[in-house]
Amino acid sequence: MNPKTYAFISDLHLQAEEPEKTNIFLRFLQSEARSVDELFILGDLFEYWVGDDQADEPCIAEIILNLHELTKTGTKVAVMHGNRDFLIGQKFSKLTGASLLPDEVLIDIHGQRALLLHGDTLCTDDIDYQSIRAVIRNPEWRREFLKKPIGERRQIARSYRLESESAKKEKEKEIMDVSLETLYSTLREWNYPLLIHGHTHRPQHHAHEVDGANCARFVLADWSATRGHALVFDKTGSREIDLS
Ligand code: MN
């Protein structure tokens, strides 16, 4: 049997206001993704997700339909929550055929242990963000939020985004990158795996030496209106593919 082909994407931040980017994703689902055995979407597929009733919007409905077409052809799709779309729920999973992943997952890629994360949990120097995260990831907050009418939820999500955009401008760049201390303790905790994450929008392949162990870290690229990116592992090794 041939080794499986895995693809990893993150930080697409899809929204109705950016149809070009959505089209790049739809083309990817209809072409390259078909030859992938397992597609991992590591968070922030959407710019915001205020509840699974958002699936009724025409732009979202088309994305869901195409994801469903892909899973029907036999490609497994797994979705991890990002900081923007952490409210993706069971209805989305049912409509697309994609499974929902917990915040940290260890998988096996051709005999190599790989830890998958969105990446925001590594950015512990951003104390403001981490305290907001602790609030909004609380199940009680989630229950109360989802009870509100969709218009109100959209409004709240919008004000959160504006707030975080303006806060970002004032924060030093280092604060919004991963904390090396947290990174090393995570690698230690998981027994020195390969690490794949997104979130920081700082695509790069890093090599870390921790306690004498060599750990590769792949940071996935965010998508723009003109270009998408995927990290692929197949029988020839790992490679980046650009999508347009
Ligand atoms: Mn993110």
Image (spheres, rainbow, N blue to C red):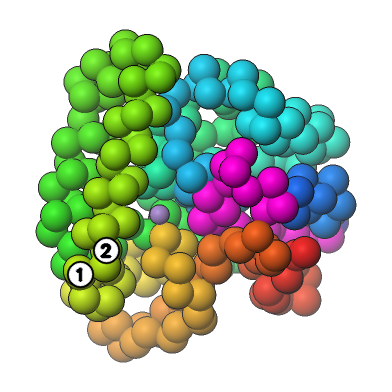
Q: Tell me, yes or no, whether the highlighted magenta stretch contains residue 14.
A: yes
Can you tell me whether the CB of the residue at mark 1 lies under 8 Å from the nearest atom of ligand 1? no
Distance between the Cα atoms at labels 2 and 1? 5 Å
Q: Amino acid at mark 1?
A: Lys
Q: Quadrant of the C terminus?
A: bottom right
Q: Circle 1: is it few (<14), some (14-19), or many (20+) Cα within 10 Å? A: few
Can you tell me whether the CB of the residue at mark 2 lies under 8 Å from the nearest atom of ligand 1? no
Looking at the image, which residue is at 69% across and 66% down? 227
Q: Is residue 181 visible?
A: yes
Ligand 1 shows up in the quarter that is bottom left
Write down the residue under mark 1. Answer: 171
Residue 2, image quadrant: bottom right
Looking at the image, which residue is at 25% across and 49% down? 163
Q: Where does the magenta region start and end?
A: 2-22
Please give the label number shown on residue 168: 2
127 to the left or right of 236: left
192 to the left or right of 33: left
Is 172 above or below relative to 91?
below
Q: Nearer the viewer, residue 214 or 218?
A: 218
Looking at the image, which residue is at 21% across and 24% down? 141
Q: Where is residue 148? Give x, y as percent.
A: 32, 13
Q: Where is residue 113? Give x, y as percent.
A: 50, 63
Q: Where is residue 125? Give x, y as percent.
A: 17, 67
Is 232 above or below relative to 72?
below
Assign a secondary structure to mark 2. helix
Residue 159, image quadrant: top left
Is 51 above or below relative to 42?
above
Is 116 above or below relative to 75?
below
- Asked whether the beta carbons under mark 2 and mark 1 sit within 8 Å of each other, the answer is yes
